[in-house]
Amino acid sequence: MIKVGILGYGNLGRGVEAAIKKNDDMELVAVYTRRDPSTLTIKTPTAAVKSTADLDTGKEELDILVICGGSATDLPEMTPKYAAMYNVIDSFDTHARVPEHFANVDKAAKSAGKVGIISCGWDPGMFSLNRVYAGAVLPDGQAYTFWGKGVSQGHSDAVRRIDGVLDARQYTIPVPEALERVRSGENPDLSTREKHLRECFVVAEEGADLARIENEIKTMPNYFADYDTTVHFIDAEEMKANHSGLPHGGSVIYSGTTSDGTKHVIEYSLNLDSNPEFTGSVLVAFARAAVRLNAEGASGAKTVFDIAPAYLCRESGEELRAHLL
Amino acid sequence: MIKVGILGYGNLGRGVEAAIKKNDDMELVAVYTRRDPSTLTIKTPTAAVKSTADLDTGKEELDILVICGGSATDLPEMTPKYAAMYNVIDSFDTHARVPEHFANVDKAAKSAGKVGIISCGWDPGMFSLNRVYAGAVLPDGQAYTFWGKGVSQGHSDAVRRIDGVLDARQYTIPVPEALERVRSGENPDLSTREKHLRECFVVAEEGADLARIENEIKTMPNYFADYDTTVHFIDAEEMKANHSGLPHGGSVIYSGTTSDGTKHVIEYSLNLDSNPEFTGSVLVAFARAAVRLNAEGASGAKTVFDIAPAYLCRESGEELRAHLL
């Protein structure tokens, strides 16, 4: 059994816990929290709830620690720190800071003889893999990534921070015409606005100035200003009834040519009922790979690009070749 | 520059040649043929046309040999033979004989200190990768593979062998309702007939008994008897005008659950103008991986499951992380 620890018990931590239940070669040993452990109830009766202080001893009996923190401040600190003690994996997704994060984790993991996988999930993660495979097979081509339809938690949070907003949910939606043009192999140049729409559902305080809120959303730099955005005001009941899930998904579409006029289109798409449960499932599969690689003597930082697919699987090479090749 | 040899110059050999032109770190050194080399004209002016007898010396200066033979009789003999002399790669696709072929190539390649990649292309190949990744991420799920719409060369050949048939093209077509049911996450049980249709375009000899030909096609065991098949008789001109390409493609659709009622659907689909040019492109990307693995000291037989994606790419790890993660 692979002994797994989870650091952080938000949506993603619970998604990892759900994923572990689906893999009978893995067991959840403990959830580590910065909160008072006695206040936390988890869904795995056989696992402990512990404080991060226990983790900091470096003495927890874990084959791997899945670090479920935020990319802005948690992971840049936590992943290198714990890579110096345990095999670790995270879902770091601040693109511009990947080189720095990789270097920090690499240094810590190498000196401890541990493996640290960073930026694992679906994007970065499965989408990245598909960009790389497609680009390697069809070097004369172009990749397009579309996200959605799905809930963007970052954009939902941004709307919630507006004065007078009680709750908000933001859906990112690919523009159907853009999808069709890319699937046709046309290789169009698409602006930000041409690729995605944004749709917001907002619960406002009673008496709030709805026109002001709508305007603040639509003109918000980086988040909304470059997109066509629609805003719907709803009540808390409707929010709960129709928008309580965290569905997501999207597509990586790659089109390329191999000779004059000979085109090929590769599409990888995800349709996910729960973003955190799917992300957790990817983390758990790669956690298995990290443990195996480390058992073979590997150490240092890795990404999904560095890991042969067979390492993700419980099946032996013989079984994979016999049944899945 | 990676020095590549191609053994066999049929559709696939020409596809590999086209793919090499798209990769500026690779050069085609020679095409090896069992025919009289003087009868063969290739599209790469800088490459030689040589006899397989030259290859048999084991002295050709090649980083890798791409073996473009048939799976029935050529590859089981050729791939182990040349794996004892060169790094090799093939597209062996006789599923039931993969374990035997892998063992033979492994033995030859290991004793020579070479790498031999077998069963590389899109199915087996890219589709296999997607079955493995999806199954690893969502162990509680099911994979469905659909082929087409596209030309099946094996089925076209089978129709051509019928008495009175001058030429034939067979298209394999997924049943739209089956695709929709699988995409919905329903996980249906589908019979062979429910998954694919077969459509044949046939040029018959003048005066041939068309009803007999149609009946022979539709009742042919293994190839057609288990499918709904339609047969169209056309003339040679229409065949040339509308059916001279070798388009193909298909989808691997995987649906699985991570908790009660929480479903996820992963779909990988290919829409290929030219089956042999795409297959050749996959072979060339993995040929690069074989050469690199061998340079690092690896030897023996490998499949797509055993190769980390970064090995397929010209870009460095830093570049991949910065631009594609």
Image (tube, coloured by chain):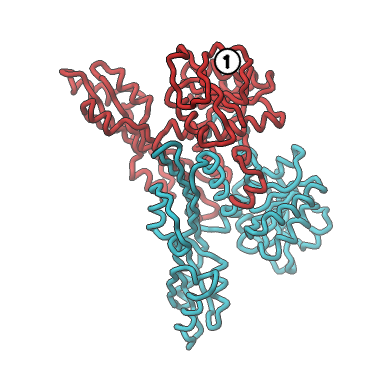
Chain colours: A red, B cyan
**Residue extending furthest toward the bottom:** B207
Residue at 49%, 61% in the rendered image: B150
**Residue extending furthest toward the left:** A207
Question: Dot 1: what SS?
Answer: helix
Q: Tell which of B296 and A276 is nearer to you.
A: A276
Residue at 64%, 26% in the rendered image: A115
Name the quadrant containing residue B312.
top right
Depicted A45 relative to depicted B142: above or below: above
Q: Chain of mark 1?
A: A
Q: Position of residue A31 (x, y in %)?
A: 51, 21
In the rendered image, the quadrant that contains the N terminus of chain B is: top right
Q: Position of residue B160 (x, y in %)?
A: 55, 76
| In the image: residue B81, left or right of residue A320 | right
Q: Tell which of A77 and A141 is nearer to you.
A: A77
Q: Position of residue A85 (x, y in %)?
A: 63, 18
Depicted B203 relative to depicted B126: above or below: below
| In the image: residue A31, left or right of residue B314 | left
Q: Position of residue B88 (x, y in %)?
A: 72, 51
| In the image: residue A276, left or right of residue B156 | left
Asked if residue B19 shows in the view, the reply is no
Crowd band around label 1 with a 10 angstrom C-alpha radius: few (<14), some (14–19), many (20+): many
Name the quadrant containing residue A14.
top left
Asked if residue B299 shows in the view, the reply is yes
Residue at 50%, 40% in the rendered image: B138
| Badge 1 amino acid | Leu
Residue at the spot of label 1: A55
